[in-house]
Amino acid sequence: MDKFVVRGGNPLVGTIRVSGAKNSALPCMAAAILTEDEVTLENIPQVRDIETERKLLASMGAEVELGYGRAQHRTTISCRNLSDPVAKYEIVKTMRASSLVLGPLIARCGMARVAMPGGCAIGGRPIDLHLKGLEKMGAVITQEHGYLEARASRLRGTELFFDKITVTGTEDLLMASVLAEGETVMENCAREPEVSDLAAMLIGMGAKIEGAGTPTIRVQGVEKLHGTRHRINPDRIEAGTFLIAGAITRGDLIVANCNPGHLGAVLEKLREAGATVEILNADSIRVRSDGPLQAADISTQEYPGFPTDMQAQYMALATQAEGVSRITENIFENRFMHVQELARMGANIAVDGRTATVRGRAQLSSAAVMCSDLRASASLVLAALVAEGESILDRVYHMDRGYERIEEKLRGVGAQIRRMGNVFGNG
């Protein structure tokens, strides 16, 4: 099992490039199910979840080429022959996004059988809102032996209201509705850039969608979709992670190939914490931190609020800020598992329900720590970059689910970090 060995103390200086967004790429790969034609996706990150999605689509009968070498970061998908519309447990057990094939499979094949999803242990992500919406569109859904089975001769357009904002629910029902009969109006939709990215791809395939990126999305169903070529958004969470890395190490870092417009809440908090943040152009941000960092509170919210996927990384920054920071997690109920590992490195953090109180400025020291989920892994890397001595991070396969060769990228801007074990994605 791979480990990271990190020696702290080096400021990060230089330029670091952001990969494509895993959370955009996964629904866009699922959307290829909706057409018999070939779909080409560019700026695909080379991360473990993408390989899992490839296996999932291939197990259903799709032809999926993941580009390596000259065609790196590109995938070509043909779902002409979907002989087995089943998302098998042995494939999806490590990935929450598996539920995203539910909507497109019903829309295209009239049936779907999907294992209940797995993924990070950061609290419940029930898909009842997906199911409620599909049933309202005419699907008959049963559950047995850990699988959901849904059937519909053709889905019907309807009015849908999400009781709670859900990104995957919005994406799943958006994909289901593009081939439904008539108009579908979805209210209280997620506004995340990943939803807008998926909608842009679907429009490129011939779908009729208005309002993506707003709370209300309108879809006029069509009979058939065609193939397309689509470039995936840059990963705003990876970009945010690197921006915090620059600030926490008192570095001077340019984060390139990102979209500053997707990072408003993160940039605002970095400035509030005392970092100097400069938007250089349409796809580059410079972050510097010369003086002491200052405590600043955050409260995670749906987009455009502060993202839950940046909470753990910000907590690492808060350990190095002067004063007391209060971090409130409103999205997931079990997303403070990194706290005990940060405490092993010397952080002073107290948790009360959904709020963590961080007392800076802690002198972090090296320790052996355990990665519990994807973003917790990132927070431990950030803490290790400023800790005294050499830290060992175990179970970094969580990191490999969503960050492309993060150790190589960080090493390129001055971090002392190396991987022990078999490197994912080199074969």
Image (tube, rainbow, N blue to C red):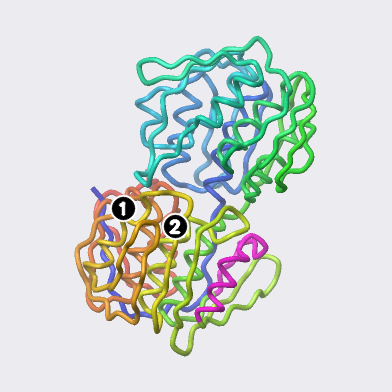
Q: Which mark is residue 329?
A: 2
Up the image or down, 388 lies above or below 197; here it is below
Up the image or down, 270 lies above or below 189; here it is below
Q: Label 1's element? A: loop
Q: Residue at x 41, y 78 (%)?
A: 249
Q: Indicate which label's residue lies in the foreground, 2 or 1.
A: 2
In this view, the residue in front, 361 or 34, is 361
In this view, the residue in front, 284 or 418, is 284
Q: Which residues are magenta?
A: 254-273
Q: Main secondary structure of the magenta part?
A: helix
Q: Label 2's element? A: loop
Count of marks, rendered view = 2
Residue 295 lies, in percent from the top left, at 44, 79
Up the image or down, 121 lies above or below 178; here it is below
Q: Which mark is residue 369?
A: none
Q: Residue at x 64, y 16 (%)?
A: 138
Residue 72 visible here: no
Asked if the stretch drawn in magenta spans residue 66, the answer is: no
List the residue tagged with mark 1.
396
Asked if the stretch drawn in magenta spans residue 265, the answer is: yes
Q: Residue at x 28, y 49 (%)?
A: 422
User: Whole-Å distance between the Cαs marked 2 and 1?
Assistant: 23 Å
Residue 103 lies, in percent from the top left, at 59, 25
Q: Residue at x 38, y 60 (%)?
A: 378
Q: Quadrant of residue 411?
A: bottom left
